[in-house]
Amino acid sequence: MSDVPGEAPIVVEIEQILRLLSKGEIELHGRLPWSSNYSFLVSVRDEELECLAVYKPQRGERPLWDFADGTLCLREYAAFVLSQALGWALVPPTVLREGPYGLGSLQFFVDADPDLNFFSLRDAYPAEFQRVALFDVLTNNADRKGGHCLRGQQNRIWCIDHGLTFNAQHKLRTVIWDYAGQPIPLNLLNDLRDFKEQLTNPQDVRQVLERLLSPREVESLEKRLDELIAAGRFPQPGPGRSVPWPLV
Protein backbone atom coordinates (compact mmCIF):
# COMPACT_ATOMS: atom_id res chain seq x y z
CA MET A 1 0.00 0.00 0.00
CA SER A 2 1.48 3.34 -0.97
CA ASP A 3 1.48 6.27 1.45
CA VAL A 4 0.93 9.93 0.59
CA PRO A 5 4.06 12.09 1.22
CA GLY A 6 3.66 14.24 4.29
CA GLU A 7 0.85 12.15 5.74
CA ALA A 8 0.93 9.45 8.39
CA PRO A 9 1.30 5.91 6.98
CA ILE A 10 -1.98 4.10 6.45
CA VAL A 11 -2.21 0.99 8.64
CA VAL A 12 -3.81 -1.91 6.78
CA GLU A 13 -4.53 -5.22 8.49
CA ILE A 14 -3.48 -8.47 6.82
CA GLU A 15 -7.13 -9.54 6.58
CA GLN A 16 -7.83 -6.44 4.48
CA ILE A 17 -4.89 -7.22 2.19
CA LEU A 18 -5.99 -10.83 1.79
CA ARG A 19 -9.54 -9.74 1.02
CA LEU A 20 -8.23 -7.27 -1.56
CA LEU A 21 -6.03 -9.92 -3.18
CA SER A 22 -8.88 -12.43 -3.18
CA LYS A 23 -11.68 -10.22 -4.49
CA GLY A 24 -10.11 -7.12 -6.05
CA GLU A 25 -9.99 -6.30 -9.74
CA ILE A 26 -6.68 -7.27 -11.36
CA GLU A 27 -4.94 -5.04 -13.90
CA LEU A 28 -2.00 -6.59 -15.73
CA HIS A 29 1.11 -4.41 -16.17
CA GLY A 30 3.64 -6.81 -17.67
CA ARG A 31 5.94 -9.75 -17.17
CA LEU A 32 8.66 -9.54 -14.53
CA PRO A 33 12.16 -10.01 -16.00
CA TRP A 34 14.62 -12.75 -15.03
CA SER A 35 11.99 -15.22 -13.82
CA SER A 36 12.20 -18.80 -15.14
CA ASN A 37 8.41 -19.12 -14.97
CA TYR A 38 5.85 -16.56 -16.09
CA SER A 39 5.40 -13.95 -13.36
CA PHE A 40 3.49 -10.71 -13.83
CA LEU A 41 3.33 -7.41 -12.01
CA VAL A 42 -0.31 -6.44 -11.51
CA SER A 43 -2.41 -3.91 -9.68
CA VAL A 44 -5.29 -5.10 -7.50
CA ARG A 45 -8.01 -2.67 -6.45
CA ASP A 46 -11.43 -2.50 -4.86
CA GLU A 47 -13.60 0.41 -3.69
CA GLU A 48 -11.24 1.25 -0.80
CA LEU A 49 -7.74 -0.10 -1.42
CA GLU A 50 -5.17 -0.69 -4.14
CA CYS A 51 -1.83 -2.46 -4.16
CA LEU A 52 0.76 -3.98 -6.47
CA ALA A 53 1.05 -7.75 -6.51
CA VAL A 54 2.91 -10.57 -8.26
CA TYR A 55 0.73 -12.98 -10.21
CA LYS A 56 2.17 -16.42 -11.05
CA PRO A 57 -0.28 -18.34 -13.24
CA GLN A 58 -0.33 -22.12 -13.20
CA ARG A 59 -0.30 -22.09 -17.01
CA GLY A 60 3.06 -20.30 -17.02
CA GLU A 61 4.95 -22.86 -14.96
CA ARG A 62 7.88 -24.54 -16.68
CA PRO A 63 7.69 -28.36 -16.38
CA LEU A 64 10.21 -29.84 -13.92
CA TRP A 65 11.23 -33.46 -13.53
CA ASP A 66 11.08 -33.41 -9.72
CA PHE A 67 7.96 -31.31 -9.07
CA ALA A 68 4.50 -32.28 -10.30
CA ASP A 69 3.19 -30.11 -13.14
CA GLY A 70 0.95 -27.24 -12.16
CA THR A 71 1.84 -27.32 -8.45
CA LEU A 72 4.28 -24.42 -8.06
CA CYS A 73 1.57 -21.84 -7.40
CA LEU A 74 0.03 -24.22 -4.84
CA ARG A 75 3.39 -24.41 -3.08
CA GLU A 76 3.65 -20.61 -3.06
CA TYR A 77 0.36 -20.47 -1.18
CA ALA A 78 1.28 -23.40 1.11
CA ALA A 79 4.42 -21.50 2.16
CA PHE A 80 2.28 -18.53 3.17
CA VAL A 81 -0.09 -20.81 5.11
CA LEU A 82 2.82 -22.38 6.98
CA SER A 83 4.43 -19.01 7.71
CA GLN A 84 1.19 -17.75 9.24
CA ALA A 85 0.61 -20.97 11.22
CA LEU A 86 4.05 -20.62 12.79
CA GLY A 87 3.30 -17.01 13.71
CA TRP A 88 6.38 -15.82 11.82
CA ALA A 89 4.74 -13.88 8.98
CA LEU A 90 7.80 -14.26 6.75
CA VAL A 91 5.90 -14.63 3.46
CA PRO A 92 3.99 -11.64 2.05
CA PRO A 93 0.19 -12.04 1.98
CA THR A 94 -0.63 -14.60 -0.72
CA VAL A 95 -3.81 -16.10 -2.15
CA LEU A 96 -4.81 -18.57 -4.86
CA ARG A 97 -7.30 -17.22 -7.35
CA GLU A 98 -8.30 -16.88 -10.97
CA GLY A 99 -6.44 -14.16 -12.84
CA PRO A 100 -5.98 -12.96 -16.42
CA TYR A 101 -4.29 -16.26 -17.35
CA GLY A 102 -6.25 -18.58 -15.10
CA LEU A 103 -5.56 -20.01 -11.66
CA GLY A 104 -2.39 -18.79 -9.99
CA SER A 105 -0.83 -17.41 -6.85
CA LEU A 106 -1.22 -13.70 -6.17
CA GLN A 107 1.23 -12.21 -3.69
CA PHE A 108 1.46 -8.72 -2.24
CA PHE A 109 4.38 -6.89 -3.85
CA VAL A 110 7.06 -5.86 -1.35
CA ASP A 111 8.57 -2.48 -2.20
CA ALA A 112 12.21 -3.17 -1.34
CA ASP A 113 15.68 -1.91 -2.24
CA PRO A 114 16.87 -4.31 -4.99
CA ASP A 115 20.48 -3.81 -3.94
CA LEU A 116 19.84 -5.39 -0.53
CA ASN A 117 19.70 -9.15 -0.01
CA PHE A 118 20.49 -11.79 2.59
CA PHE A 119 24.24 -11.23 2.34
CA SER A 120 23.98 -7.49 3.02
CA LEU A 121 21.23 -7.83 5.65
CA ARG A 122 22.20 -10.90 7.69
CA ASP A 123 24.44 -9.16 10.27
CA ALA A 124 21.69 -6.67 11.16
CA TYR A 125 18.84 -9.20 11.40
CA PRO A 126 20.12 -12.43 13.00
CA ALA A 127 16.85 -13.27 14.78
CA GLU A 128 14.82 -12.86 11.59
CA PHE A 129 17.17 -15.00 9.54
CA GLN A 130 17.17 -17.74 12.16
CA ARG A 131 13.44 -18.00 11.46
CA VAL A 132 14.07 -18.01 7.73
CA ALA A 133 16.65 -20.79 8.10
CA LEU A 134 14.20 -22.97 10.04
CA PHE A 135 11.38 -22.12 7.65
CA ASP A 136 13.50 -23.32 4.73
CA VAL A 137 14.24 -26.60 6.48
CA LEU A 138 10.54 -27.14 7.18
CA THR A 139 9.50 -26.28 3.62
CA ASN A 140 12.45 -28.22 2.16
CA ASN A 141 13.25 -25.14 0.09
CA ALA A 142 15.24 -26.14 -2.99
CA ASP A 143 16.01 -22.58 -4.03
CA ARG A 144 16.70 -20.09 -1.22
CA LYS A 145 18.80 -17.49 -3.00
CA GLY A 146 20.08 -14.38 -1.24
CA GLY A 147 17.91 -12.19 -3.46
CA HIS A 148 14.76 -13.90 -2.20
CA CYS A 149 15.19 -12.09 1.14
CA LEU A 150 13.86 -8.53 1.11
CA ARG A 151 13.74 -5.64 3.54
CA GLY A 152 10.42 -3.89 3.24
CA GLN A 153 8.83 -0.94 5.01
CA GLN A 154 9.59 -0.46 8.71
CA ASN A 155 12.74 -2.58 8.19
CA ARG A 156 10.72 -5.78 8.03
CA ILE A 157 12.30 -8.89 6.51
CA TRP A 158 10.23 -10.78 3.93
CA CYS A 159 10.94 -13.95 1.96
CA ILE A 160 9.61 -14.62 -1.54
CA ASP A 161 9.75 -17.27 -4.31
CA HIS A 162 8.57 -20.51 -2.71
CA GLY A 163 7.52 -22.50 -5.76
CA LEU A 164 10.25 -25.11 -5.24
CA THR A 165 9.23 -26.24 -1.78
CA PHE A 166 7.63 -29.15 0.09
CA ASN A 167 9.10 -31.90 -2.06
CA ALA A 168 8.84 -35.30 -0.37
CA GLN A 169 12.50 -35.99 -1.20
CA HIS A 170 15.33 -34.06 0.43
CA LYS A 171 15.93 -30.96 -1.71
CA LEU A 172 17.19 -28.31 0.71
CA ARG A 173 19.42 -25.80 -1.09
CA THR A 174 19.92 -22.49 0.69
CA VAL A 175 22.51 -19.77 1.18
CA ILE A 176 21.59 -19.54 4.88
CA TRP A 177 23.91 -21.97 6.64
CA ASP A 178 25.17 -19.41 9.14
CA TYR A 179 23.50 -21.16 12.10
CA ALA A 180 24.36 -24.76 11.20
CA GLY A 181 24.85 -26.86 14.33
CA GLN A 182 23.78 -24.09 16.70
CA PRO A 183 20.99 -24.64 19.26
CA ILE A 184 17.57 -23.47 18.13
CA PRO A 185 16.50 -20.54 20.37
CA LEU A 186 13.81 -21.60 22.86
CA ASN A 187 11.17 -19.21 21.50
CA LEU A 188 11.54 -20.68 18.01
CA LEU A 189 11.56 -24.22 19.35
CA ASN A 190 8.29 -23.46 21.14
CA ASP A 191 6.84 -22.14 17.88
CA LEU A 192 7.75 -25.45 16.22
CA ARG A 193 6.07 -27.38 19.05
CA ASP A 194 2.95 -25.23 18.78
CA PHE A 195 2.80 -25.91 15.06
CA LYS A 196 3.11 -29.64 15.72
CA GLU A 197 0.01 -29.36 17.91
CA GLN A 198 -1.83 -27.60 15.10
CA LEU A 199 -1.07 -30.48 12.74
CA THR A 200 -2.82 -32.92 15.06
CA ASN A 201 -6.15 -31.17 14.35
CA PRO A 202 -7.45 -32.32 10.96
CA GLN A 203 -9.78 -29.31 10.80
CA ASP A 204 -6.96 -26.79 11.24
CA VAL A 205 -3.97 -25.89 9.06
CA ARG A 206 -3.49 -29.54 8.17
CA GLN A 207 -6.71 -29.55 6.16
CA VAL A 208 -5.49 -26.59 4.09
CA LEU A 209 -2.06 -28.13 3.48
CA GLU A 210 -3.62 -31.43 2.43
CA ARG A 211 -5.55 -29.60 -0.30
CA LEU A 212 -2.33 -28.06 -1.62
CA LEU A 213 0.24 -30.85 -1.21
CA SER A 214 0.33 -34.60 -1.77
CA PRO A 215 -0.07 -36.97 1.19
CA ARG A 216 3.63 -37.88 0.98
CA GLU A 217 4.61 -34.23 1.04
CA VAL A 218 2.54 -33.55 4.16
CA GLU A 219 4.05 -36.63 5.85
CA SER A 220 7.55 -35.44 4.93
CA LEU A 221 6.80 -32.00 6.40
CA GLU A 222 5.79 -33.68 9.65
CA LYS A 223 8.97 -35.74 9.65
CA ARG A 224 11.17 -32.68 9.16
CA LEU A 225 9.30 -30.91 11.95
CA ASP A 226 9.78 -33.85 14.34
CA GLU A 227 13.48 -34.06 13.49
CA LEU A 228 14.02 -30.36 14.17
CA ILE A 229 12.24 -30.54 17.52
CA ALA A 230 14.10 -33.70 18.57
CA ALA A 231 17.53 -32.37 17.56
CA GLY A 232 16.99 -28.89 19.00
CA ARG A 233 19.66 -27.62 16.63
CA PHE A 234 19.92 -26.11 13.19
CA PRO A 235 20.89 -28.86 10.74
CA GLN A 236 24.24 -29.14 9.00
CA PRO A 237 24.49 -29.13 5.21
CA GLY A 238 24.47 -32.60 3.71
CA PRO A 239 27.14 -34.25 1.55
CA GLY A 240 25.43 -33.27 -1.72
CA ARG A 241 24.74 -29.89 -3.25
CA SER A 242 23.47 -27.68 -0.44
CA VAL A 243 23.37 -24.21 -2.07
CA PRO A 244 21.42 -22.90 -5.04
CA TRP A 245 22.92 -21.31 -8.13
CA PRO A 246 23.22 -18.46 -8.65
CA LEU A 247 23.60 -17.48 -5.01
CA VAL A 248 21.67 -14.24 -5.44
Image: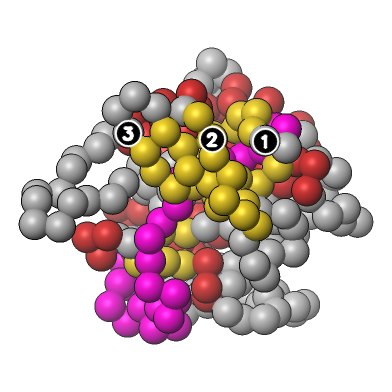
Instruction: Kindly tell me whether residue 3 is visible in this rendering.
Output: yes
Callout 3 amino acid: Leu
Asked whether the residues under the numbered discs 3 and 1 touch, taking CB atoms below 8 Å apart as contact, a structural biologist would say no
Vertical placement of residue 163 versus 222, above or below: below
Spatial CA distance of label 3 from label 1 is 20 Å
- Which quadrant is home to the C terminus? bottom right
- In x, y percent, where is residue 205? 52, 27
Spatial CA distance of label 2 from label 1 is 8 Å
What mark, if any, has residue 49 been given in the picture?
3
Mark 2 = which residue? Answer: 26
Secondary structure found at label 3: loop
Asked whether the residues under the numbered discs 2 and 1 touch, taking CB atoms below 8 Å apart as contact, a structural biologist would say yes
Callout 2 amino acid: Ile
- In x, y percent, where is residue 203? 54, 16
User: Which residues make up the magenta segment?
Assistant: 102-127
Mark 1 = which residue? Answer: 100
Q: Tell me how the rendering is colored.
A: secondary structure
Residue plotted at (64% across, 67% down):
33
* 186 left or right, relative to 138: left
Secondary structure found at label 2: strand
Residue plotted at (27% across, 60% down):
153
Callout 1 amino acid: Pro
Residue 130, picture quadrant: bottom left
* Sequence-first disc among 3 and 1: 3
